[in-house]
Amino acid sequence: MTRREEVDRSFEGKAVLEKLLTQSGSVADAEDVAGAFKKAIEEGVPAPVVIQALWEDEPRFETPDDAARLFGNLLGLYDLISEGKKVDLGSAATAKVKREKATKPEPYDAKEGPTDAFIESAWRYFDDFPKERQKFEHAFENRQDMLILWLDDSGLDDASFALARHLVGEVFAMLELGGRKLESINESMVPKKATLEALPRALSEWIEDTLYEAETDDEKPLPKAEVEKVRGVVARAVNALWSR
């Protein structure tokens, strides 16, 4: 997940919360959340721990506003329960909303590159259609085998190589999903120096967010020095893809 900004801690009711939960990929309902919050408060467990457990994988959102609204509703509900206030979750007009599957995003502008909206749509599409995502993974392995070999020979340790390969593979998938047909890249096509700033802004920021997550991971954070190495290697590889 990307860095979270301050949210409005306001519970808008069962119907709104369950719609947002369903759209984000959670199978929990409002009663599940309220029960988990009550138990957490009794045991002294902080709200973020409970919220993180509402998804088997990372939550997905169409827009940053949807993410802020969901977390605001969750925190608002937590506040009400922690303050001992009565919360009515029994309304008959609060049936779960079935989240519609994502549609394939429209191609991005060839000169401007992927936008924030395109990247969000791409991940929802890949989440909902894993076989489509797998096709791009196979294409990356088969057509970019020389680029993968270059990554492997770049001097990164195992964890850093895995992150670099993941990032380059995901960029490959997004670019191809958006209409590009990327040719095979060999070592001679990789620039000696490159920066992420030379890429489309949304793409650069997505890579930076992923690097930030790796560096601040609670369980196995990647050392800052390794993150810098990965940033340099990925910048060169992705610029090679983008410039073709």
Image (tube, rainbow, N blue to C red):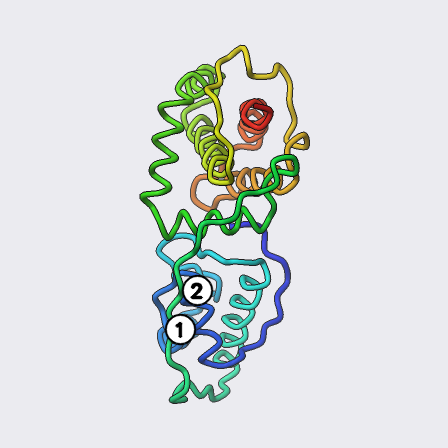
Measured as percent of width and height from the top left, residue 71 is found at 53, 66
Element under disc 1: loop
Relative to 207, residue 75 above or below: below
Classify the position of the C terminus by image quarter: top right
In the rendered view, does 107 fall on the left or right side of 169?
Answer: right
Identify the amino acid type marked 2. Gln
Lower position in the chain sequence, tag 1 or tag 2: 2
Residue that numbered label 1 is attached to? 97
* Residue drawn at x 62%, y 43% as measured from the top left: 202
Residue that numbered label 2 is attached to? 23
Relative to 147, residue 56 above or below: below
Measured as percent of width and height from the top left, residue 187 is found at 51, 12
Q: Quadrant of residue 220?
A: top left
Measured in 3D between alpha carbons, the distance from the residue under mark 1 to the one under mark 2, in whole angstroms, is 8 Å
Identify the amino acid type marked 1. Val
**Disc 1, disc 2: CB below 8 Å?**
yes
* Residue drawn at x 47%, y 74% as measured from the top left: 17
In the rendered view, does 70 fall on the left or right side of 204?
Answer: left
* Residue drawn at x 61%, y 37% as measured from the top left: 204
Mark 2 Cα-neighbour bin, 10 Å: few <14, some 14–19, many ≥20: many
